[in-house]
Image (cartoon, rainbow, N blue to C red):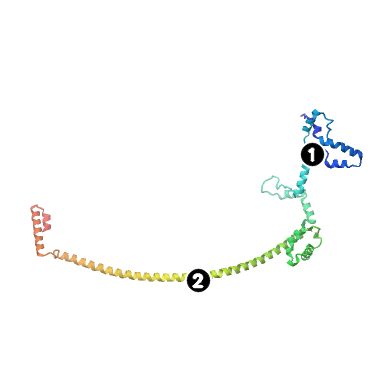
Amino acid sequence: GEVRYTANGFVEKNVETLSAELKDLGSSSTLPFIQRLFRNATPADSDSGNGPSSSQIQPKKRNSVQKVRGVSVASQFRASLSSLVGDLERTAPHFVRCIKPNPQKKPNSLDSGETLRQLRYAGMMETIRIRREGYPTRIDHETFVSKFALLLPSKEREYGIHYLVQILSSWLRATDADWQVGHSKLFLKSELAARLDRLTETRIRACARILTRFGRGVAQARAVRVLVPWVRYRLYWILEQRRYDASTRIGAIFRTHRARDRFQTVKWVVIQLQSRKRREVAKLRVRLIRDPYGDFGFKEMEKLLRTVQTDLDEKVAEKEFVRAAELE
């Protein structure tokens, strides 16, 4: 459709002030005309930012022009660009290139052909080849010495980086084409850097084994000094414990036999007393059965007879012949 633009205040908003560098450059010009031009423009710039002078703008529009102007787009862009450049100088930016693992954008799915095609089209394979043909590994002198000086004996580590490079070249049979020593950095081929890393790792592992062996020896010596007295004390304590257990067991067995003998004696005595008592009771029962009235005297027997005779007569008189028969 139709688009309409409002152009009111367009010129005033896009009026730019001269930079300080440009003002200084014009003021220091050798041409008198240029000097007068910049000398006359400087007061106008300070008042209205290189726009029309205050004498050319009517007093009624002066306030409106200042309100409309604000900050121009070019000034904002220049300030933003300066801020971006400052941020880039203060940081170490890294660029990440994203690659689609599969055309369907599904998780946990990798299409090797599609991935390789994207790497080739992006120029990554060629970049890797060029990188490998050059010196991809770049290490400053201090880092290189601190990392690889451990390969040398302790007395030779203070001879400098050139001596270190010479010794490592003789060990690895490397030539000047494999690495170059610069003023502040050392440039290495990737193969040589890998070999140096493996050599350093081997040396570190050897040192670690030596330290481990030494540490184990120290630990064993300390363990012997600590464990031997402890083992001796432990054996002595076990022997004493066995002796105590044996004495306790012997005492218990002795007390058991003594208590058993005492119990057997008491048991035999009790059995004898019980048997005698039972015999006496049995004799008494037999005697009572043979002669129920053996303990009675003549008077007692006579009294008992009269009492039974009286009961018998009463039972006969009462005609209780069963009871009378029992009494008889």
Element at label 2 = helix
In this rendering, position of residue 198 left or right of residue 232: right
Instruction: Reply above or below: 56 against 300.
Output: above
Q: Quadrant of the N terminus?
A: top right
What residue is drawn where x is 74% and y is 62%? 148
- Upstream in sequence: badge 2 or badge 1: 1
Q: Mark 2: few, some, or many residues within 10 Å (few <14, many ≥20)?
A: few
Measure how far apart labels 2 and 1 are at the Cα level.
94 Å
What residue is drawn where x is 37% and y is 70%? 255
Q: Quadrant of residue 48?
A: top right
Is residue 155 visible to the viewer in this orientation of the structure?
yes
Of the pair 146 and 94, the residue shown nearer to us: 146
| Amino acid on which disc 2 is placed | Tyr
Is residue 153 visible to the viewer in this orientation of the structure?
no
Q: Which residue is mark 1?
A: 75
Task: Residue 234 in the image: state x and y as whole percent.
Answer: 51, 69
What residue is drawn where x is 74% and y is 63%? 149
Instruction: Reply above or below: 66 against 21.
Output: above
Q: Quadrant of the C terminus?
A: bottom left
Of the pair 301 and 79, the residue shown nearer to us: 79
Q: Quadrant of residue 36?
A: top right
In this rendering, position of residue 153 left or right of residue 21: left
Q: Mark 1: few, some, or many residues within 10 Å (few <14, many ≥20)?
A: few
> Is the Cβ of the residue at disc 2 closer than 8 Å to that at disc 1?
no
Task: Residue 132 in the image: state x and y as whole percent.
Answer: 78, 56
* Residue 236 badge: 2
Task: Residue 226 in the image: state x and y as whole percent.
Answer: 57, 68
| Amino acid on which disc 1 is placed | Ser
Q: Quadrant of residue 208?
A: bottom right
Task: Residue 101 in the image: state x and y as whole percent.
Answer: 70, 48
In this rendering, position of residue 244 left or right of residue 39: left
Circle nearer the viewer, 2 or 1: 1
